[in-house]
Amino acid sequence: MPRPGPNGARTAVTRNTLRQQIADALRDEVLAGRLLPGQEFTVRQIAEQYGVSATPVREALVDLSAQGLLDCDQHRGFKVHRFTVADYRTMVESRSLVMDGVIRHAERRGRARTHAVAMVAVRRRAEEAARAARCGDLDIHIGYDLRYWHELGTILANPYISGFLHRLRVQGWVFAVPHLRVDDDRSGWLWSGHEELVDAVTLGDLGAARAVIDAHNDRALAWADRLERPDRTDGPDPADRPDLPDRPDRPERPDLPDRRERRER
């Protein structure tokens, strides 16, 4: 077979890059609550919105479907997946089991202490995520929180495990965002223990790290229980304020201009 020339290679790279840009942009729309659970749309609608061809859009939507964020209907197009409280509990329990295994594996191999240099970027994410949580800034918190856990997972585990955990956390945020948007006291629910976990990992205190992670997951489950209480109110109870899932920084992601902006250029 003839080898592709430079133009063909450039076209492939451009399409794959565009595919990823569209997937990232739509994931951000879901995480920001601008695409709501159950909301339907077609490949054509998205292609027209971003002023691009249908092929990279279709590929991006298939990718997001594979990540569990969208549902695909052959005749009606795509819609944002609607996660349930039971789904959320399963996500939290799954990530808890996996992280416990990661810590046990590190203990057995004697890889407790993590070099401080490797934790510099993670600590910056931790500081920003915790600050946003205390201020109740949901959008900023999600971005730093997701990137924090993804980078920390890359240090503690292999790429397959960290990728699986990242997908669970994105799904968890997709479920949590609509509930938190209407909670005036959301700062009481957003987890801010990021720096405490970084300190424990840096010092090699895996027992302390496990305790922080367990507390994080326990509070997330308590929050799920609160959602199902028939007497729940808009604000959280001080006695059982939980911590939540997480999300990678959006500032570094390229934004796709809409069709009108592209024409003006």
Image (spheres, rainbow, N blue to C red):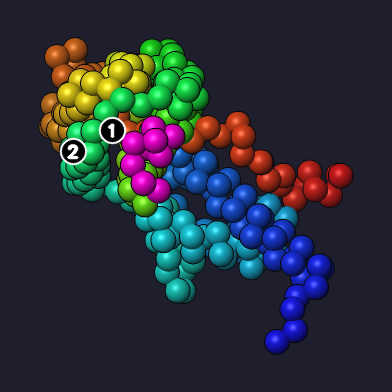
Q: Residue at x 66, y 41 (%)?
A: 254
Q: Residue at x 64, y 68 (%)?
A: 55
Nearer to the camera, 3 or 85:
3
| Image position of 11 (left or right of 66) | right
For residue 206: magenta?
no
Q: Which residue sits furthest right?
A: 265
Nearer to the camera, 1 or 114:
114
Residue 5 vertical position relative to residue 191 in the rendered view, above or below: below
- In the picture, the disc for residue 111 is 1
Image quadrant where one finds the N terminus: bottom right
Q: Which residue sits furthest bottom?
A: 1
Q: Position of residue 191 (x, y in %)?
A: 31, 22
Q: Residues within 10 Å of mark 1 (few under 14, many from 20)?
A: few
Q: Position of residue 37 (x, y in %)?
A: 39, 48
User: Which image quadrant for residue 210?
Assistant: top left
Pointers 1 and 2 in contact (C-beta within 8 Å): no
Name the residue beneath numbered marker 2: 108
For the residue labelled by badge 1, is the local secondary structure a helix, a strand or a loop? loop
Nearer to the camera, 192 or 155:
155
Q: Which residues are magenta?
A: 151-159
Q: Amino acid at mark 1?
A: Arg
Q: Position of residue 169 (x, y in %)?
A: 35, 40
Q: Residues within 10 Å of mark 2 (few under 14, many from 20)?
A: few
For residue 154: magenta?
yes
Q: CA distance from mark 1 to mark 2?
A: 8 Å
